[in-house]
Amino acid sequence: MNIVKAIAKKEFMQLKSEPRLIGFLIFMPLMMLLLFGYALKLEPKDVKMAYVDADKSYFSNLIKTNIWSEGYFKLYEVNSTTQIIEEIRSGRAHAGMYIAKDFSRKLTDNAQPTVHFYVDGTMPSLATSMKNNSDAINGSSVTNDMYFLDEDAANVVIAQDPFVLDTEVLFNKDEKETWFFLPAVIGVLIMQISLILAGISMVREKEANTLEQLLVAPISKTQLIVAKILPYTLIGFFEFFFILFLGYFLFELPVPASAAVGLLLLSVVYVGSMIAMGLFISIISQTQQQAMFIAIFIIIPSILLSGMIFPIEAMPQFIRPVAYLFPLTYFNEIIRGLLIKETLFVDLLFDYLVLFGFSIFFCIVSILKFRKYIV
């Protein structure tokens, strides 16, 4: 029993000698509790809706006013149905509405005009939520007020269903969950490989006392870093396209020919950013255990906040900026846009530049941080 106590005491002393680990053990559960309690919701708010109101009548204003008052959709006006679809394709909007020019005339003639409602099917859970909230367009709070007044005649009450709401799901018409999750899974797997493998590459040399041999070799610190990350970079590229084509053959994940160049560029900037981040973790860590904790500390929030599972639109306003601190958020925007919506490169340029910026930033910081001697 005394031996057990002595060994247990030794383990506690080792933990005490690594304050970073103690910090992670305390902060990680707290962070997870706060994320699941406050930040992660399935019901989005302020979903952007692009609309065209060609009628601009009292009746069409009833629909728009109710949408605004409900607060679920956030309206902004565009010029045509083509522009509505392009707004959804680019990711600037997730829903759209078109009210034709003859809407009020058909309404007063009891001809049941059609209001076209467009939904982004890229994220099936968000599409379902938007369809469930379509009552803001054709609910009783709208239709009950739709009647025609004529001073010279009795009130002509509009039919019980004065107009038809035609809902169209765009880009993922069958709302396949695999089309939504599989592209993000590629990013998560590459992140795990890069952060963990690259994250322990340099610190492993420190623990094995082999770093000294590398430091006395006739090689610059930049060359040493490149040599250390090259194998993991090649593994990352292989994993990217291997998982992508498995998704294509096994789950019919769309891989349009028009996305070839975009996917190649995405693999370069994303794998580069993850490897650079993993290298930075390796340099600032003193032990492999520390490197693993830091990697996990990045991986879990990335999965939860990147829009992989929970819509970013459902998160509180004060949490949303945090989501854009993780490269996986931009990766998800790009790969879903390329594969599912065939989004134009110009609409994804900002996301590409951010990922490239992550790569450059962590490479520079890692090189500056690294010293050709053992700390």
Image: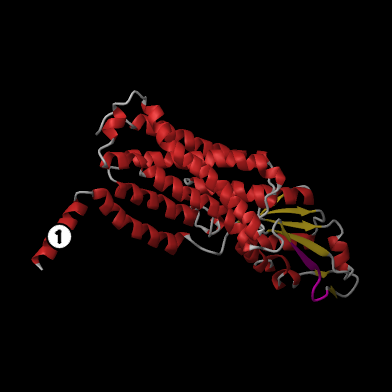
Image spot of residue 310 (x, y percent)? 53, 59
Q: Is residue 353 above or below residue 293?
A: above
- Indicate whether 326 appears above or below 346: below
For the point 38% across and 44% down, which residue is it?
199
Image point 58% across, 47% down: which residue?
A: 241
Mark 1 Cα shell of 10 Å, populated few (<14), some (14-19), many (≥20):
few
- Foreground pick, 92 / 147: 92
Q: Residue furthest top?
A: 218
Is residue 245 among what the camera can see? yes
Residue 343 vs 27, above or below: the answer is above
- Element type where label 1 sits in the image: helix
Displayed quadrant of residue 71: bottom right
Is 167 a magenta residue?
yes
Residue 71 visible, this orientation = no
- Residue holding disc 1: 7
Q: Is residue 80 above or below residue 369?
A: below
Image position, residue 248 (x, y; %): 65, 54
Towards the viewer: 189 or 217? 217
Kind of residue indicated by mark 1: Ile
Count every numbered label the image shows and give the total. Answer: 1
Give the left or right position of residue 219, taking residue 246 as reference.
Answer: left
Magenta part of the protein: which range?
159-168
- Residue 319 magenta-highlighted: no
Residue at point 69% right, 51% down? 341
